[in-house]
Amino acid sequence: MRYYSTRNKNRSFSFSEAALAGLAPEGGLFIPEHIPAYRGAVKNSLGSMSFLEIARETIAPYVEGEISLPVLEEICAGAFSFNAPLIQIRSGVSGPPLVLELFHGPTAAFKDFGARFMARTFSWLRRGEDRPLHILAATSGDTGGAVADGFYGVEGISVTVLYPRGRVSGLQERQIAGLGGNISALAVEGSFDDCQALVKAAFRDGVLREKLILSSANSINISRLIPQGIYYAAAAGKALTGRWDPDGEATPRNLNGKVSRSPPPWSGDPLSGGPRPVTFCVPSGNFGNLTAGLYAMAMGAPIAGFIAATNINKTVPDYLESGEYKIRPSRATISNAMDVGAPSNFERMAAHWNYRELQGMIRGISATDEETRSAIAGVYRDYGYYLDPHGAVGWTAVQKFAAGNRNAGSFMPGSAVVLATAHPAKFAETVEALTGPVPVPGSIQKTLERHPRARAIPAELSVLRDFLLEGP
Ligand SMILES: *Cc1c(COP(=O)(O)O)cnc(C)c1O
């Protein structure tokens, strides 16, 4: 597979070049020359294949000729050592949203899928090199932790994470800045957009480019995006065949007899005559996750469409409604991993699909903090299930879409699947005020015991440059 920059179709790159560079030379994002299709036999059996089988089938065409199948399988087995259960949080009622829990990895957010795959892939691509690779990652909260964890201790690679000072949770800060070793943390005076702009500026900086081998680990990196398609294909296959996961796979919940314990038989819309492709509701910020879903749909996974759920940073929902793309400064919310006013993956979406095509596949819905809080409280009250603020934005968007849209059925013919992008214990400050104590998984417990050590810097390229050249 060859890759192009969204800003220059004249020069193509290999997967390794695109992955290791992160950002294309003139500031564009790498995209594959075409989106491959699942083989027919794969498309028809996604519901019964294992996660690792789907991983191999999803990623192989993107790395063909560069990473052999056995190596790819080994990378995937190491990266995806946790599950992504598709669960129904109540039974017996028609049209309940299903929840795809993407927070069972080590940093308790979906970004573990992309970051762990990327770290293992980089390590393999760089085998035998002696100059170190320097990775820069801007984060609004969760990317930093996932990238730090994925690369921690990987030889020949050092990582610098930039996060907006005071705008991430205590746990996120410990995930980003509590490891040390080959992971450095910079607390930037400014917003996530400032962090992202700094990283982009560093990539364009002549001095840094001459002295260091730089790479990025944001969701702009194509090697993070591609593996995120796996869970869409796996969940779409399961939903289509009515095989969602037993409740025991899922955490956390307060059972109280309110929640089904075993997967019920298909209980979708009785008029539909059976299972239909699902609509995924994707809590979105930088739109990497949603773009990965679009790739999975284009590859042939049985997906009807997407709801792009945002908080009040609703640049993309506004675009989908008006056709005008207007970036704006980000505003702080309780779903802070989605506080993005200039979503970087939009450029990638727009390079593959025009406005009409995007409108045909995606509906945008936004939720306020008040609506998000009310969803967390209501879902807990009614079902004993804990949503994190990001998943709660998704939950709200599905309810609003179904309630406010008479044509919902034609866009959302099968069930809606809400992506639960983070574990509620990751945002305990917000969630517990509405639900009482949230059970804390072991991985988070251990992280809470770390001490964050970050350097505070102003949002200035010269300061970042000095830090990178001199080391911590
Ligand atoms: C990063 C993140 C998002 C947003 O994902 P994008 O790919 O940036 O759109 C949503 N929820 C959580 C918990 C996240 O960490």
Image: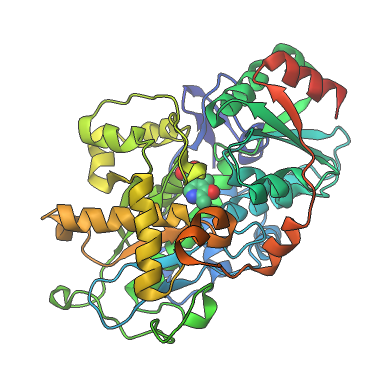
Picture coordinates of residue 410 (x, y %)? Answer: 15, 58
Q: Residue at x 83, y 44 (%)?
A: 180
Which of the 4 image quarters holds residue 14? Answer: top right
Q: Residue at x 68, y 16 (%)?
A: 461
- Residue 275 falls in image quadrant: bottom left
Choose top left, top right, bottom left or bottom right for residue 223: top right
Q: In the visual, does 159 lie left or right of 377?
A: right
The answer to whether residue 112 shows anywhere in this view is yes
Q: Nearer the viewer, residue 156 or 323?
A: 323
Decide if residue 272 is on the left or right side of residue 337.
Answer: left
Residue 398, compared with residue 467, is above or below; it is: below
Residue that appears at 64% across and 20% down: 459
In the displayed structure, would residue 204 be above or below residue 252?
Answer: above
Residue 118 appears in the rendering? no
Which one is nearer the viewer's eye here, 471 or 334? Answer: 334
Quadrant containing the C terminus is top right
- Going by the picture, which residue comes out furthest to the left? 406
